[in-house]
Each structure stands twice: as C-alpha cells, then as structure tokens.
Image (cartoon, helix red, strand yellow):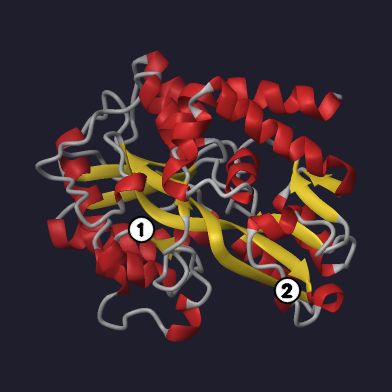
Amino acid sequence: MSKWLHTAVPAVAVLLVASFPATAETLTVVTAGGEYGDAMRQAMWEPAAKELGFEVRAESQSDSLAALRMQVASGSVTADVIHLGSNEGAQAAALGLLEPLDASVVKQDEIPEGARSEYCVPFSSYGTVLAWNTKTYGDKAPKTWADFWNVEAFPGRRALRANAQDQIEIALLSEGVAPADVYQVLSTPEGLERAIKRIEELKPNVAIWWTSGAQSTQILKDGEVDMVVTWNGRAANAAADGGAAAYTFNQNIVGTDCFGVPKGAPHAAEAMKLIAAMTTGPREAAMATLISYGPVNKTAFEGGAIPAETLAKLATAPGNVENALFARADWWAENGQEAQVAFDEMMSR
C-alpha cells in the first residue's frame, strides 16, 4: 500500500455510499479510505461520475492488492476501479490481475514518460527526500545525496530506511549517476552491487534504520539524527510540529499511486472512461488543495489552480521536479526481490 496512508482502515470493505442495484452505469471504486479517500471522492470520482452520468459506490480496503488477488482468484470480481501504489500496480499487472488500459480512452500524454503505465494510471505523488536538523548545520545545509554521504564536510548521525527501495537509487545518485541512467545501471549485476557497496560504506554512520514513516518523522523532530532519508510529507510534518527540520526536493525520488481496472471487472469499459475523467489536470489540481500529494498530470500546474504555498510542498511541482527521479514500478516488480536480498545480506554483515 502507498506510503501516504497514515490512518489504518478496516481490512473489511467499508461501504461509503448507499447501496443500490448494480447497473451498467453503477461502478464500484476501491480506495484507501480515510482522508486520502475523501480527497479522491471530492476532487476526482464524484465530479467525474456526475459528468459521465454514472453512479459510483466506494469501498475502502487496508490492503487493496490482497483484495484484488482474492477477487480475481475466486472469479468473483466486484470492483471496477482500484487504487494501488504504483509498485503494487506493477506487481498486479505482472500477475495478470489488471486489465490493460484502453489507450484510446485513457490517454497519458500529459504524464511524465517515466511514470506512465500500461495497466495502472498514476495520479498522485510523493517524494523521498533528504531532510536534516537545522540546528546541526545552520546555514551550511546539505543539498545533494553526495552531501549525505560526505561525513567529513557534514558530520553527524544518519538515518536510512531499512529497505532496499529508494535507498539503492539514492546510493547511485550520491555517486553522480544521472537520474535518467539509474535504472539502466541497476539492471546490471555490477550496478546493483555498486549501490549496495555504497550503502555499506555509509553504514558506520547510520545511527537508525527506520521501519515506518512515523518513526522517520519522530527521529527528525526529536533531533535523534542529523540527516534522514524520508518522505516529503513526513519531513514537513516534523517541521510543522516544532522540530528543527528542513528538507530539499533536489534529487528526490518521486513515487506514485495509480488507478487500475481489475481483470474481469464487471464494467471495464465504463471504468476506463471514469479513470480518464478522474485523472485530468484540473481534478488532480483540486485534490492537491485537499491533501498535500502532488499531481502527476503536468497540466494540473497550469492556470494557478494550486496556491503557491501548496505548490512549494509538492514533489512534482515546477521547481521541485526538474532534477527528480521517477521510481520505476516495473523495475521493482521484476527486480525487487533480488535487490532486497542483496540489501538484507549487506545489513547482516
């Protein structure tokens, strides 16, 4: 599930809209629920459904991928549109759990090339960023991942996530690999080994290997570490809660969430139309004003629909995205297990 889910939702689906008999125009949308699901409803599927003349009932799941697997395996698919983390979307596609998107209906011309998918349309984003303690570094703040590794110029305690994802990309960026070349390098045995060795070099200076977003916020806020790899929303929360914290979007790793159509969905054709209508620039912009997750559709940033103070907090906003790396969900679906095994072996040494 996406890294952004801060509030647990029941494992059993929760009906959010009154039930009514299913028709060709009644679609079931499965979302994360909570504040995130409410923002999607208000900004995206509710106005999109009204425009198309569809009725929509929404369900929330704590583990949408598990629910998807269960429905497809049982041959009893009830969902028409499902919200997944893009890595989950890639896994679902590889397992044959999603319908291929109808490219004549769901167009992705306005989505950055590195984020596009044939099965799950990215619509919302977050950034994995470098954050630091402002009391430690004052006016001489770190600006790059190379600075994160430079323990002589920037002494202090580091914190990394106890997971291969994002950490191996960051390791290569710290060595000067261009964002456009990171996955090409990682696709070779030598490239993955190089990234793991780079992390191992920093290991003596890593005070905490965090395992949850809440933990990364707390250690930054409390000053337990001087630099931390975390998500932009978590870093912003640490600062808002009174922590001496700052962060940069320079070289941030952009992750996304996406909408897909389950294999065997009862209203697949209508679902494609609903996804296309939900993921327009204006609707993604509207959602960004309700919850601070960045749009993926580039036209969302046109026309001043998103206030300047909100733009500054979004990973995909102009000024923040130019030197970013879009996480490759398809790469992780194919290579994630090998990468995690290599990371775990390094951690045990």
Q: Residue furthest left?
A: 104
Which residue is tagged 2?
141
| Whole-percent x, y for residue 113 in the image | 29, 48
Q: Nearer the viewer, mark 2 or mark 1?
A: 2
**Residue 272 drawn at (x, y percent):** 19, 42
Asked if residue 81 lies left or right of residue 66, the reply is left
Q: Residue at x 47, y 36 (%)?
A: 183
Q: Taking 183 as reference, is 193 left or right? A: right
At x 41% / y 15%, what residue is drawn? 73
Any part of residue 133 in sight: yes
Residue 296, label in figure: 1
Q: Are marks 2 and 1 in contact (CB under 8 Å)?
A: no
Q: Residue at x 67, y 55 (%)?
A: 146
Tell me the element at label 2.
Answer: loop
The kind of secondary structure element at disc 1 is: loop
Taking 103 as reference, is 300 above or below it? below
In the image, is residue 308 above or below residue 167?
A: below
Is residue 315 shown above or below 31? Answer: below
* Residue 41, x across and y down, in percent: 38, 60
Q: Is residue 67 visible?
A: no
Residue 103 is tagged as none
- The crowding category of the residue bearing disc 2, from other C-alpha atoms within 10 Å (few below 14, some 14 to 19, many at least 20), is some
Q: Name the image quarter holding the N terminus.
A: top right
Query: Where residue 273 appears, x then y in whole percent?
Result: 16, 47
Q: Amino acid at mark 2?
A: Ala
Amino acid type at circle 1 is: Val
